[in-house]
Image: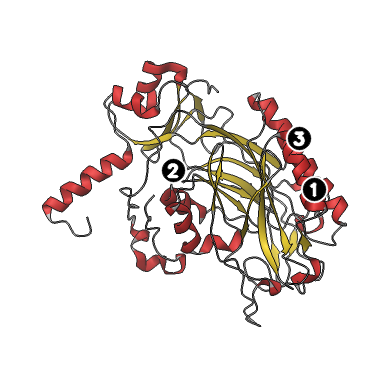
Amino acid sequence: MDFFRNPRVRLGLREQPNIWEAGEDKPEMRTKRLTRRGFLATTAGASFGGIVSPAFPVKVAAKNNAGSRLPLGHDPRTLADSGASHGRVPDYQDRKSTSDRLPRKVTVGTVMQPFWGKHPGLEKRLHLLTDIVDRLQVQSQERYGRGLDLAVLPEMAVTGEGESVGNAMEWSFPLEGPVKDTFVRKALEHHCHIVVPLYLLEGKNTKSCSNAAVLFGRKGEVAGIYRKVHLVVDSQTDALEHGATPGKEVPVFSCDFGKLGIQICYDMDFDYGWRELARQGAEIVAWPTQSPQTTRPVPRAIEGSTYIISSTWRHNASIFEPTGKIISQVRWQQIMGDPSSAGNLLLDNNTLVQEFDLSYAIVPWSATLKNGELLTRTFGDKVGYRYYEDEDRGLFWSNDPQMTIRQMLRTLNLEEEREELQQARERYRKAGVPDS
């Protein structure tokens, strides 16, 4: 379920309610000894709420018709010393804006599906995963009248994590064979890109495996593979994630809808991959992950000017826009039971489909903007936006195939946030303001 039934909305001023309702049952969940986050096994009380309803009252404004190196800040562990904790604005001057490009609507699908427990066998697991992709395709057709552009499955979706964990070589799968054959057919059937994560057996003679995500293209081709760089380190043995081999590269894949990057789970905690994706101009980042966190992705989305699609094992699957806001989210429901025992079940209400536009402008508050109403009066349904009164900014896009959002803004003498900040920075330099 999405925050916004209509992606072009205006949010009212109100505090976000607590995610979990008071008095909810909090079933226990046992994690593996070594999780993707690197923590030892514990028994934690986990509260599971329903699918999130809008965090704020929603007022529909109108219908939605169809690189240089970027400084990403400091390692999150030293955030208190970085200045970012004091509200330091990311440096916009090196970012390439997409507001001068004609509309590029993209429809993405994701899922929240656990994979703990005994592996059911490759045939059954692949059947479960293709059923999920089928469901996403149906949702896309029902909601937007067209098929998916991109489906993202969770970390280790094909392999799970091994019933007794152990050496990942023992429960890795090669790409060639059933895995490749299955998703080649599915990508061709739905004419979409699919991100398929697994522990990848690199070759019969290499005796190595990677925590990887394979990108299948619309034509059924293997469009690329990302191998997780930042593997979890076992704090007791110093081993890297069940004996896996870390990746060495952070590629960006040129898809027909835009530039796609991939990061996997623990990669979220380290700047290197995100810097590389920003440097190469990634517009969407698929983030298959065991960890369902929603705080760390916010600065990644803002500083990288990217949409981030999380696909998780529990709690939530979310879509973050470049403002850092979550625009769509599905959450665990009590009726789904305990995630640790639902690994081989096709769950209900655990999928999410969302359309957004990769040609957009982030526009700050101004007296003339009137929270976006100026554009609505001028362009009607030809403009779309999400404006956040509590942030004094919004994300705007064009629904006119012949006109860019930048042209619309120029018509009304409105500036993008990046332009306003650059003007301020130049004035500060003249005034001798430090670090400007």
**Residue type for callout 1:** Asp
- Helix, strand or loop under label 1: helix
**Is 34 placed left or right of 69 in the picture?**
right
Q: Nearer the viewer, mark 3 or mark 2?
A: 3
Q: Seen from this angle, which residue lies furthest bottom?
A: 237
Name the residue at 44% across, 28% down: 102
Residue neighbourhood size for the residue with mark 1, other residues' Cα within 10 Å, grouped as few (<14), some (14–19), many (≥20): few
Residue 202 falls in which quadrant of the image? bottom right
Q: Nearer the viewer, residue 328 or 309?
A: 309
- Tell me if residue 169 comes above or below residue 403 in the rendering: below
Where is residue 149? Give x, y as percent. Answer: 63, 36
Name the residue at 37% across, 22% down: 375
- Tell me if residue 70 comes above or below residue 235 in the rendering: above
Q: Which residue is identified by label 1?
A: 181
- Helix, strand or loop under label 2: loop
Q: Nearer the viewer, residue 163 or 292?
A: 163
Where is residue 359? Give x, y as percent. Answer: 45, 34
**Is 435 placed left or right of 130 in the picture?**
left
Label located before the other in sequence (3 or 2)? 3
- Helix, strand or loop under label 3: helix
Q: Which residue is identified by label 3?
A: 189
Q: CA distance from mark 3 to mark 1?
A: 12 Å
Q: Which residue is identified by label 2?
A: 323
